[in-house]
Amino acid sequence: MKEKKKLKAIKKHIKNFPGVSLDPHGNRTRKTIRFEVSDHEDITSSISALLELCYYALDGNGVFVSPKHSNRTPTTSVTKVLEMVIDLLPHDQMFCLDKITEILSAQELKKPKP
C-alpha cells in the first residue's frame, strides 16, 4: 500500500514536470520542451541573441567549446544553435498575421469610398 502511494506521488510529480513532454502529432509523438517568452518582441530578441552568438562563435576570436566536451567542435555547436533558431522562428504566428492582414485588406477594398 505504501509503495502505491509513492508511485502515485512520483507519477504526479513527473506529470507536472516542465521538462520534455510528449505531444501527439499526426501518427507519431513529438518530444517537445517549452521556451517561455513574455511577448512577440521577446521571441525576436531571443532569436537575434542566438544568431549573434553564432556569428561571434564562427568569427574565431573565442573558444566556445568546453574542454569536457572535446568531441564537439564550434561548428557543430553553432549548427545546433542555428537549428534551434529555425525552430524558434514564429512561422505559425506570421502565417496567422498574413491571413489577418489579407482579411482586413479585402474588407477595406469592399468598403465604399465616401
Image (cartoon, grey):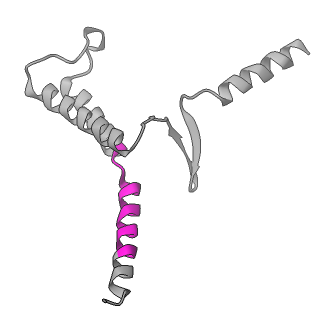
Q: In the depicted view, which residue is nearer to us: 96 or 4?
A: 96
Q: Is residue 25 above or below residue 61?
A: below
- The x and y percentages for residue 100 are 40, 68
Say whether residue 97 is magenta.
Answer: yes
Q: Which residues are magenta?
A: 88-104
Say whether residue 57 is magenta.
Answer: no
Picture residue at 23% right of the left edge, 31% below the top: 78
Q: Quadrant of the C terminus?
A: bottom left
For residue 98, what is the image quadrant? bottom left
- The x and y percentages for residue 11 are 73, 25
Picture residue at 14% right of the left edge, 27% below the top: 56
For residue 22, what is the image quadrant? top right
Q: Is residue 49 above or below residue 41?
A: above
Q: Is residue 16 above or below residue 41?
A: above
Q: In the depicted view, which residue is nearer to us: 103 or 78?
A: 103
Picture residue at 8% right of the left edge, 23% below the top: 60
Q: Is residue 82 left or right of residue 104?
A: left
